[in-house]
Image: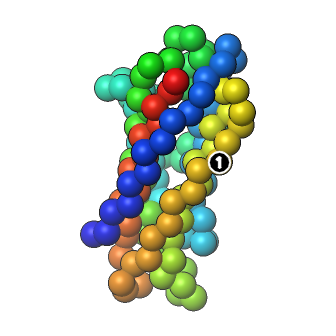
Amino acid sequence: MKSVTLVTDYQVADAVVKLSVVIGDAQIGSSIVKLGSTPLGKGAIEALPVGAGPAVRGNPLFVKTIVTDVNDSTNHTSVTYRLTGGRLDQEFHSAGTVDENGDSVVYRARFNLI
């Protein structure tokens, strides 16, 4: 199984940081989200509250998403991570291609909340 990793920083502010994970290319997927070692959510992730900026600053936010190719017209897969509530709302993109129809890609993301 292929794997794609994203490691980046996200600047928090005083508001509640929220995370959405969007599976692209008409594929299917599911995610697990942790703040440090604390589980925050699993399954479809839409505007998941991570925590207030001052409380989460200095912690890593981990996201693991398995995307399975179900779209017969492409083997391309992608994930978009949307973080809001920080200094700027931002989107981060990851992409990968499976070798055969029905294969999956493991997407891992680490957001250092600074």
Is 87 displayed left or right of 72 in the figure?
right
Q: Number of callouts in the render? A: 1
Residue located at (42% from left, 40% from top): 110
Question: Can residue 71 be seen?
Answer: yes
**Along the viewing direction, whichever of 2 and 28 lies nearer the viewer:** 2
Is 1 displayed left or right of 18 in the figure?
left
Residue located at (46% from left, 31% from top): 112
Asked which colour scheme the image uses, the reply is: rainbow
10 Å crowding of disc 1: few (<14), some (14-19), many (20+): few
Q: Position of residue 26 (x, y in %)?
A: 61, 71
Rendered view: 36 above or below 77: above
To which residue does mark 1 refer?
91
Residue located at (66% from left, 27% from top): 86
Q: Which residue lies furthest to the left in this view?
A: 1
Q: Where is residue 67 in the image (x, y as percent from the top left)?
A: 44, 63
Is 91 displayed left or right of 44 in the figure?
right
Q: Position of residue 100 (x, y in %)?
A: 37, 86
Rendered view: 69 above or below 21: below
Rendered view: 1 above or below 37: below
Residue type, numbered disc 1: Glu
Looking at the rendered structure, the secondary structure element under dot 1 is: strand
Which of the 4 image quarters holds residue 96? bottom left
**Along the viewing direction, whichever of 27 and 83 lies nearer the viewer:** 83
Which of the 4 image quarters holds residue 37? top left
Question: Can residue 102 be seen?
Answer: no
Which of the 4 image quarters holds residue 107? bottom left
Q: For the N terminus, which image quadrant? A: bottom left
Residue located at (48% from left, 82% from top): 75
Q: Position of residue 58 (x, y in %)?
A: 44, 19
